[in-house]
Image: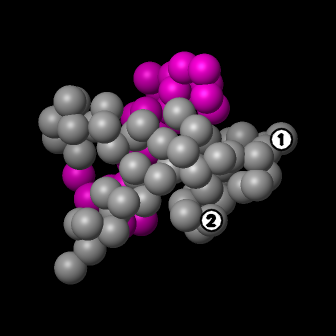
Amino acid sequence: MEKLKVQIIEQLNLEDMEPSDIENEEPLFGDGLGLDSIDALELIVLLEKEYGIKVEDPKEGKKIFESVKTLAEYIESRKN
């Protein structure tokens, strides 16, 4: 999850943040980290570029991008 936090910070240019600033179960959108729909697109690009994972179902995406923990679990479940 630490590596994923670093990738999120780099991908979204969150220059003022450290991986330790992001809680594993903190919501990525809304009250948590406060990401928006543009950030969601950037996270989709990150998944495709770094892990070869495509997110095609918006409903599935909402669950995947709930928190760093859910994102990490999704990546782990898609590894072969």
* Residue sitting nearer the eye, 68 or 52: 68
Name the residue: 43% across, 59% down: 72
In three-dimensional space, the C-alpha distance between marks 2 and 1, rounded to whole angstroms, equals 17 Å
Q: Which residue is pictured at 37% across the width and 55% down the height?
A: 47
> 48 above or below 34?
below
Q: Nearer the viewer, residue 73 or 34?
A: 73
Q: Residue at x 65, y 52 (%)?
A: 10
Tell me the residue that label 2 is attached to.
2
Residue 48 coordinates in the image, percent (x, y): 33, 56
Label 2, residues with CA under 10 Å away: few <14, some 14-19, many ≥20: few
Query: In the displayed image of the protein, which residue is found farthest to the front?
Result: 25
Q: Horizontally, is 46 left or right of 28 in the view?
A: left
- Farthest residue to the right: give it: 16
State the residue position of label 1.
Answer: 16
Describe the element under mark 1 as helix, strand or loop. loop
Name the residue: 40% across, 40% down: 65
Q: Is residue 15 magenta?
A: no
What residue type is disc 1 on? Asp
Q: Is residue 15 left or right of residue 5?
A: right
Would residue 49 be visible to someone looking at this image?
A: no
Q: Position of residue 35 (x, y in %)?
A: 56, 27
The image position of residue 56, as x and y in percent, is 17, 40
- Image position of 76 (left or right of 46): left
State the residue lying farthest toward the bottom: 80
Tell me where residue 51 sits by quadrant.
Answer: bottom left
Residue type, numbered disc 2? Glu
- Please rate how many residues cluster around mark 1, counting C-alpha atoms within 10 Å: few if below 14, some from 14 to 19, many from 20: few
Mark on residue 68?
none
Camera-nearest residue between 60 and 23: 23
First to last magenta residue range: 28-54
Where does the N terminus fall, quadrant-wise? bottom right
